[in-house]
Image: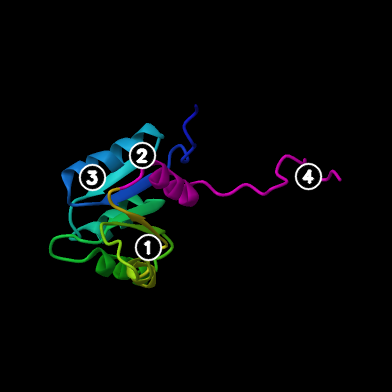
C-alpha cells in the first residue's frame, strides 16, 4: 500500500502544547515528506508564520495563556497570513463545538484522540489540490 501524497516540500506549522501530540503530528507529517514548524504556545505563532510561510496550520484550541481560536482570529485579521488554512485539532467534541470552531475562522476540524486516517485525509485536502475529473484527457482533444 502506498502512502498518500501530502505534497512533497510542503510546510505545516503545528501549534500544540502536548509533547506526545506534537511528536505524533510531526512524525505523521514527516513520514509523508512534509516539513514541520513547531510552536508549543501561542506567543510566537504569528512571527513564525511570517518567517516560514507555512502551507497549513494545525491549531490546538486549548493552549496555555491564549486560546487557539484567538490565535486563529489574529491570523485571519493579518493580510499577510489570512490565506493560510487553519485546521483545529482539539478534544472539544461536543455538539456545536465544530461549528463554533469553524465560526472562529478554522477551515476544518480534527477531534482528539485523532484517527490517523482522518488526520492524513484532512491534511491532504489542504496540501494537495484536487485534480479535475478529466485530467487524463490531453488539452485540445475531444
**Residue 97's x, y, as percent?**
32, 68
Real-space CA distance between mark 4 and mark 1, rounded to the nearest whole angstrom: 35 Å
Q: Nearer the viewer, mark 2 or mark 3?
A: 3
The quarter holding residue 105 reads bottom left
Q: Which residue is outermost to the top?
A: 1
Q: CA distance from mark 1 to mark 3?
A: 24 Å
Q: Which residue is mark 1?
A: 81
Classify residue 17 as left or right of residue 30. left
Q: Earlier in the sequence, mark 4 or mark 1?
A: 1
The answer to if 35 sits in the magenta stretch is no
Q: Which residue is mark 4?
A: 139
For mark 3, does the 10 Å Cα neighbourhood hold few (<14), some (14 to 19), or many (20 or more) residues?
Answer: some
Gap in angstroms between the C-alphas marked 4 and 2: 34 Å
- The boundaries of the magenta stretch are 114-142
If you read the primary sequence from the N terminus, does the residue marked by circle 1 or circle 3 appear first? 3
Disc 2 packing (10 Å; few <14; some 14–19; many ≥20): many
Quadrant containing the C terminus is top right
Question: How far across and down, in percent of the image, does residue 3 sit?
Answer: 46, 32
Residue under label 3, please give it: 21
Q: Of the residues tagged 3 and 4, which is closer to the observer?
A: 3
Amino acid at each position: 500500500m502506498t502512502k498518500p501524497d501530502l505534497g512533497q516540500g510542503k510546510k505545516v506549522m503545528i501549534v500544540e502544547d502536548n509533547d506526545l501530540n506534537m511528536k505524533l503530528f510531526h512524525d505523521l507529517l514527516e513520514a509523508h515528506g512534509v516539513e514541520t514548524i513547531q510552536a508549543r504556545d501561542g506567543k510566537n505563532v504569528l512571527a513564525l508564520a511570517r518567517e516560514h510561510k507555512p502551507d497549513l496550520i494545525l491549531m490546538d484550541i486549548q493552549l496555555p495563556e491564549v486560546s487557539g481560536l484567538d490565535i486563529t482570529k489574529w491570523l485571519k485579521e493579518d493580510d499577510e497570513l489570512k490565506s493560510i488554512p487553519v485546521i483545529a485539532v482539539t478534544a472539544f467534541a461536543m455538539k456545536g463545538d465544530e461549528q463554533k470552531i469553524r465560526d472562529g475562522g478554522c477551515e476544518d476540524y480534527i477531534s482528539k484522540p485523532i484517527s490517523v486516517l482522518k488526520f492524513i485525509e484532512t491534511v491532504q485536502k489542504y496540501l494537495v489540490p484536487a485534480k479535475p475529473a478529466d485530467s487524463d484527457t490531453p488539452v485540445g482533444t475531444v
